[in-house]
Image (tube, rainbow, N blue to C red):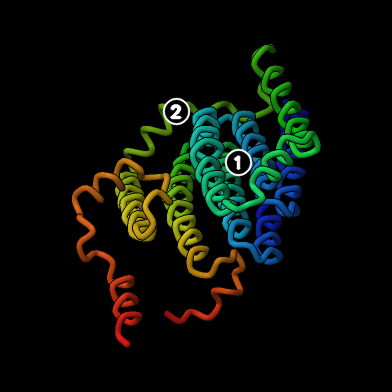
Amino acid sequence: MEIAFYIAGVVAIISTMMTITRLNAIHALLYLVVSLLAVAVVFYILGAPFVAALEVIIYAGAIMVLFVFAVMLLNTGESDIVRERLLLSSEVWLGPSILSSVLLAEVGWLLFREPPTGAFPAAIEPKEVGIALFGPYLIGVELASMLLLAGLVGANHLGRRDPGTEETEEAENADTRARQPAAGGDLVRAGADRVTSAP
Amino acid sequence: MFALGLIGLLVRRNVIFTLMSIEIMLNAAGLAFVAAGARWGQADGQVMFLFVLAMAAAEVSVGLALVLRLYHHFRSLDTDAASRMRG
């Protein structure tokens, strides 16, 4: 148990160091995904399986997909085919795959072994988390929902100028665009247009 | 790990790497919360991690929208290009 904890921690630290020292954004993203998975394993060992699942789903799933889409959108150029071929070369994915295979072996060993002996703290069940979340922390839940709403509206507003650049709230974006016709929405572009046509 | 994220934030001058470093720092704070909650057997650490998670999701969506906007404006991903904030 302890050795698994330390292995996962070492993998997390190594992959984080590789993340901040890579020059290419895609390579850094690969190492960042490995780092998040390692932190999820650490959570599982610490007795928080619910949080570990959320880490994998939200961080390594949603947020990383968002990052990948943004990087791909920013990298549209003439050298795409070369970069695409470069991505498939072995030294790019060798390091992340080694680290994540270490994590996979560790998870397999954790799943198919005898129950823990008690050196580590007992697992906190999702039921307790839910009771605490909707008991004394109810105002925090409401505040988080308002924060998410503000993030939604802000991202929608910032990504409105060029349609298709926002992946998070695609359905909401489409809905809003359908409701708001492009008649006079963009004040910045309207002003720029007037300046160019003035003389 | 928080220190690593901070170093990355200070060293790199790319907006994408800045955002990634912020993610690393938030993740390290959440890890500290969960570890403390597991140490004392309370569920509050995990609740706080859920809040950190929601905040990270909102932050990264707004941040990436800002990055795309910045790129379309400056054609570059350098943070120093945006240091003079004139409309």
**Badge 2 element:** helix
The chain under label 1 reads B
**Where is mark 1, residue-wise?**
B35
Closer to the camera in the image, B7 or B82? B82
Q: Position of residue B67 (x, y in %)?
A: 50, 60
Q: Chain of mark 2?
A: A
Count numbered badges in the picture.
2
Looking at the rendered structure, the kind of residue marked 1 is Ala
Farthest-out residue, right: A91
Percent across and percent down for residue A41 are: 64, 31
**How far apart, in angstroms, are the residues tagged by discs 1 and 2?**
16 Å
* Neighbours of disc 1 within 10 Å: few (<14), some (14-19), many (20+): some
Residue at horizontal 69 percent and vertical 42 percent from the top = A31
Q: Residue at position x 35%, y 50% from top?
A: A148
Q: Circle 2 sits on which residue?
A: A126
Q: Quadrant of the C terminus of chain A?
A: bottom left
Q: Is residue B22 above or below residue A194?
A: above
Left or right side of A198 for A108: right
Left or right, residue A152 beside residue A126: left
Q: Which residue is at the front of the view, A66 or A150? A: A66
Q: Are marks 1 and 2 on the same chain?
A: no
Is the residue under label 2 in contact with that under label 1 (CB below 8 Å)?
no
Q: Residues within 10 Å of mark 2 (few under 14, many from 20)?
A: some
Residue A159 image position (x, y, % from top left): 38, 57
| Residue lying at 65% horizontally and 54% vertically, measured from the top left | B2
Residue reaching furthest to the bottom: A199
A42 relative to A125, above or below: below
The amino acid on which the numbered mark 2 sits, given as a three-letter code, is Pro
Q: Residue B55 or A25: which is nearer the viewer?
A: A25
